[in-house]
Amino acid sequence: MEGSGEQVSDVKIDDLPIRDELRGKSPYGAPQLDVPVRLNTNENPYPLPEPLVERITERVREAARNLNRYPDRDAVELRTELAKYLTKTGKYLVGVENVWAANGSNEVIQQLLQTFGGPGRTAIGFEPSYSMHGLIARGTGTGWISGPRNDDFTIDVAAAEKAIAEHRPEVVFITTPNNPTGNAVPPETVLALYEAAQAAKPSMVVVDEAYIEFSHGDSLLPLLEGRPNLVISRTMSKAFGAAGLRLGYLAAHPAVVDAVQLVRLPYHLSAVTQATALAALEHTDTLLKYVEQLKAERDRLVAELRAIGYDVVESDANFVQFGRFEGDGGAHAAWQKILDRGVLVRDNGVPGWLRVSAGTPEENDAFLDAVRELKKEQSA
Ligand SMILES: *Cc1c(COP(=O)(O)O)cnc(C)c1O
């Protein structure tokens, strides 16, 4: 072949003068494959209801008239509405001064690590957990420590306390309900780790509650009382069915909200994003009804997977981790066989386990048919 295409493709990432810690690494990569049933990224399977689509259109049209101007840099109206939502659902009084918002909770986490992590500092998470915590740590030059979990995927409190005392990280991540395993972390565990983190060196404890609306239990928001180094991070990507919107937020002491503003890019939340999120928040009650349906479907998945003969981790999220698939690469082979039947689930690299997101009843039926066949094949 002639031309520059081939020459350009000869250049690999590692030929560029990239930062040493990025060499040989892979980006976040949940496959976006075009298959009939996609149950791999914990999205809400229900499209937004039509009245909400109408309201978004109205609010965005209004915003469009002012796109010659920069948006509200501090997103005050949006943060006020998020604070009302948290107060209503979280059994704890949250004000605008306690809330910060960004483009997805991934950006919230990035801003937290830019503020409290960075070169010469470390963050710890208890794995398997949300892989982006480690990836964003790396992206911000923060050292990453992979803390332990028990075989049943609960946090081993004594081992976690020991790891915190030993490494003295500046940031501690606790994901509850945890992704990919689905189990919630008891409040006592969060409190114990908060105490351990303060004893080792005053550190920030970030509780990632991306899936809290799906939980059998309550948000840990009330733990913010008297704990200025605690942060609760939330998102509209899952329960609000708005992954495409890119809106995440945190609740914390007002000093934390002031601190992250030292690193945020000016005008990071576009006027279109703010208008869309405000419209979605007007429809909270409708959106939370879908959450109830998804919780029922999640419980059905757990029950049916067990009836088929799979092991399942108790789930407080909108997904279920199931297994076990024996042997080296057993989980990946099973992932491929389920995909061959038109259903995309997630292989998070946890040996022996796969994760399925709760979809519509029809999607879940298709998934259950696929894994039922797989079970028959494997026990034949
Ligand atoms: C999906 C998910 C998020 C959401 O990230 P967004 O950037 O808000 O879409 C955050 N934390 C965890 C644990 C998640 O699984």
Image (tube, grey):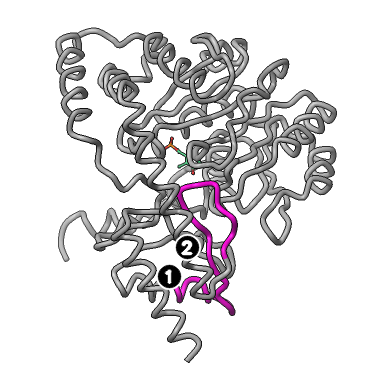
Query: What span is colored magenta in the figure?
Result: 312-334
**Which residue lies at the image location 66% right of the left edge and 43% below the top edge?**
185
For residue 70, above or below residue 362: above
> In the rendered image, which quarter contains the N terminus?
bottom left
Estimate the spatial distance between the alpha carbons at disc 1 and disc 2, rounded to whole Å: 7 Å
Q: Secondary structure at mark 1?
A: helix
Which circle marks residue 335 in the picture?
1
Residue 213 lies, in percent from the top left, at 48, 36
Q: Secondary structure at mark 2?
A: loop
Q: Nearer the viewer, residue 257 or 320?
A: 320
- Relative placement, left or right, of 103 versus 271 is right
For residue 36, above or below residue 239: below
- Relative placement, left or right, of 44 versus 222 is left
Circle 1/circle 2 CB separation < 8 Å? yes
Task: Determine the image quadrant of residue 114.
Answer: top right
Residue 175 lies, in percent from the top left, at 60, 41
- Type of the residue with mark 2: Asp
Q: Is residue 355 magenta?
A: no
Residue placed under numbered mark 2 in the picture: 347
Check disc 2: other Cα within 10 Å, few if <14, some if 14-19, many if 20+. many
Q: Nearer the viewer, residue 332 or 232?
A: 232
- Type of the residue with mark 1: Trp
